[in-house]
Amino acid sequence: MSDRRGGPGVARREPSLLDAVTFDALGLGDRTYLLHDDAVAVVVDPQRDPQPYLETAARLGVRITHVLETHIHNDYVSGGLALARRAGATYVLPRGEKVAFADERLALGDRQHFITGTLRVQALSTPGHTPHHLSYLVESTRAPLGTGGYVCTGGSLLGGGSGRTDLSGEELVRPLARAQWESVRRLLVTLDETTVVLPTHGFGSFCSSTPAVDAGDGVVTIALERTRNPVARRDLDEFVRDITEDRPPIPRHYHYMGALNRAGAREVRTGQTAIVSATSLTRVLERDGYVVDLRPRRAYAGRHRIGTLNIELGVNLTTYFGWLVPFDAPFSLIAESPEEIEEARALIARIGRDEIAGWAPSTELLGAGRGIGTYPVATFADLAHSASGSGLPSVLDVRHPSEWRAGHLREARHLPLPELAAARSALPDEGRIWVHCAAGFRAAIAASMLAAVGRSPVLIDDLFANAAPAGLEIETGERDCTGTGDVPIVAR
């Protein structure tokens, strides 16, 4: 499997007593693992669709006996319960988590273990990312215990970092940050240095406090993390300050995922999505619903239905759909083919968005007539050429705050994409607004939002790395998010 939803890759260890298969949830920045001994397998932190794990187990000729959750997830709907039911496996959760299906789960606490086949699985209490978080040490009973194996760390110890601690409520942010430091230290100090670290988050996930650090050969070990992980290099107070003061934004849909996972999510619904008319799409918009156009950004800019939201079909659809389309809002989709709709359905089902009002083929919606819009597409070189004696035209930067602080156009206004809908009154009513992000994806969404309310966007479809070579001045530090009042610039 190698489509946009991600697929498994097999990581082999020598001697071949224990193997791990990795499934990447591209776009979400998460990973699921299937560990096996050629006879039985355990699956750790599965995504919602159980089919890839069942198919891989069948291909390997192994039986899934246990499905493990390191924690109740905030960023996606787990497929753990559905997979356990389909496979006839035991569903394992951290002790202390309250769920609606208590009679169908095995609750494990610190240092408790079980053996399946020749796999020994021990639970290690590692609170921090969530209050009841567990890591799982998976070893072969055919090798001396404590001499390697794998540790599945969920949102605790990550590659070059650790999971964020602010997803369980503001009052727990600092206590969980202190717990996170202790938990990561525990793993670094007590586990054998050859133990391979298999984190769930940290590959672009907003559950990570910092981006993951590449391990070069892709293998992250306890030995490597002892040398580079911030927890190993910082004392407790410094770590708590760093992880709590400069936090990544929290996607809107995170507020719903925990409740769905505690209730026990049903399997993804199957069946064709109904085709709807242009009139039906208009009704959705009139009822405060959303119509999401999945086409490429340049095609959308060239011709689109005014009022629609352009989120390109691809791995980032899941996160930004969940972030920008309210969880209880009705929605329809526009695409170029039924195959694209099915791909989109699979991506947004990861976050529990199953109720699609319908979809419409773009070719039937974009003929001549009222309600059709267009806006220009440009590069940073075009922006530089547009400068006059009074400076640049109106420029809107919709990247995240950390990106802005690292470097931004001197005359730009900053309004992170998730805040745009609520704060667009801070933008000028007339004239063109040049919109950019890091590579064009988020800017395309922002441009469609501005066009929907009668503004005149120019989509900068370009890499931000091209801004300085184009002659645009870059500065670093802080500035008021609307650009209406400056505070001192702090150069780095």
Image: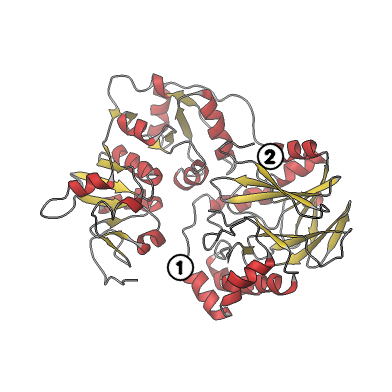
Q: How packed is label 2: few (under 14 Cα within 10 Å), some, or many (20 or more)?
A: some
Q: According to the image, label 2 marks what residue?
A: 266
Can I make out residue 177 in this image?
no
Residue 478 percent coordinates (x, y)? 32, 67
Amino acid carrying label 1: it is: Asp
**Quadrant assignment, res 182:** bottom right
- Of labels 2 and 1, earlier in sequence is 1
Q: How packed is label 1: few (under 14 Cα within 10 Å), some, or many (20 or more)?
A: few
Q: According to the image, label 1 marks what residue?
A: 246
| Figure coloring | secondary structure
Can I make out residue 41 in this image?
yes
Left or right: residue 425 versus residue 91 is left
Residue 95 percent coordinates (x, y)? 76, 62
On residue 280, the disc is: none
Q: Residue, x 64% and y 32% (percent of image)?
A: 269
Q: Residue, x 60% and y 56% (percent of image)?
A: 201
Give the label, 2 or 1, closer to the camera: 1
Q: Residue, x 56% and y 77% (percent of image)?
A: 234
Residue 52 percent coordinates (x, y)? 70, 38
Name the secondary structure under disc 2.
Answer: loop
Q: Quarter holding the C terminus?
A: bottom left
Say whether marks 2 and 1 touch (CB < 8 Å).
no
Q: Residue, x 59% and y 42% (percent of image)?
A: 352
Q: Which of 41 and 361 is in front in this view?
A: 41
**Quadrant assignment, res 451:** top left
Left or right: residue 236 versus residue 389 is right
Residue, far left: 389
